[in-house]
Image (spheres, grey):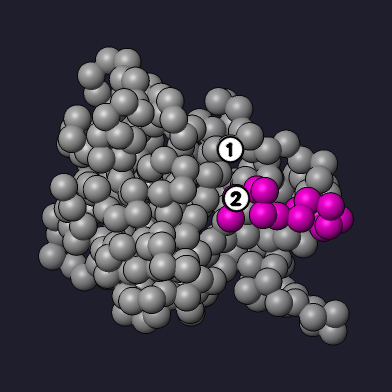
Amino acid sequence: MNQSFSNGSNGASEPRLIVENVTVAFEGFKALSSVSFTAHDGNLIGVVGPNGAGKSTLFNAMAGLQPMDTGRVHVNGRTAEHLDFLAYVPQREKINWRFPASVEDVVMLGRSGGRWRWFQRPSAKDKEYVRYCLERVNMWVHRTDLMPELSGGQRQRVFIARALAQEAHVFLLDESFSGVDVGAQKYLVEILRGLRDDGKVILMATHDLTNLAERFDQVLCLNHHVCAYGPPNEVFTPAVLEELYGAHGVTVTGSGPNHRHHNETNG
């Protein structure tokens, strides 16, 4: 079922993002096996699959945080270690929320790849751009608030603003809907659609298979390898669902991706 090296555009332009034959192994176990796909400008892509399928590993490899056994990741024709091209928002469980940083401070870190030193001072241009980024996600009014004081949805908006402050072309969001209520999720999707319409490539890992066709342009189905990649209404065939979740692992209500699919075995 591997439709791995397809892309999200019918246009003739070169893809913004190329992921080719990425393999990552831990003590002999292949967390990722020959994962390949491409994406053009202006794509909002959902990355779905069961727990332990390799979604976070893929994002870590793409961001240069996890060594690859084989493969390459290119953004704008350059390797993804150039993090000015790629912005990564990890799972909230991996973030130290006790650090008393303000909203504005967190977004300002995006201007320097998270490496401000005590003797560095942001320029007037940096300050102006941070304001633009916070206004873009409707968080400028909260700029002096501390991160631990924010709701889950507000925190995600701040991290999207920080990614935007990097002036990155590719955004990786790992389970950004986790701990976020339905209303905040809808608002996040609206923000991401706006970034997509600006030409960004956005990949979001999610367990929630509800309304995928309404949220995403493309879906990457991942279970250690690429099971399918394409428009949501096309990729969710019974065979793909079985490859993702097993013959008895999914209860399907309705017949299309706009209905809810429950993974009974692995969340």
The amino acid sitting under disc 1 is Ser
Secondary structure of the residue carrying numbered label 2? loop
- Where residue 95 sits in the image (x, y, percent)? 70, 55
Residue beneath disc 1: 178
Where residue 220 appears, x then y in whole percent? 31, 48
Q: In the image shown, does 224 or 83 lie closer to the viewer?
A: 224
Q: How far apart are the alpha carbons under marks 2 and 1?
A: 8 Å
For the point 84% across and 84% down, the residue is 119
Residue at 72 percent across and 36 percent down: it is 151
Residue type of the residue flagged with mark 2: Gln
Residue 166 screen position, x and y as percent? 56, 68
- Magenta residues (range): 90-103
Q: Does the magenta portion include 101?
A: yes
Q: Main secondary structure of the magenta part?
A: loop
Q: How many labels does the image show?
A: 2
Q: Is 158 on the left-hand or right-hand side of 48?
A: right
Q: Is mark 1 on a helix, strand or loop?
A: loop
Residue 111, image x, y percentages:
64, 71
| Residue at which label 2 appears | 91
Label 1 crowding class (10 Å Cα cut-off): few <14, some 14-19, many 20+?
Answer: some
Residue displayed at 34% across by 48% down: 223
Residue 95 seen in the figure: yes
Task: Tell me if label 2 and label 1 are in contact, CB under 8 Å.
Answer: yes
Q: Earlier in the sequence, mark 2 or mark 1?
A: 2
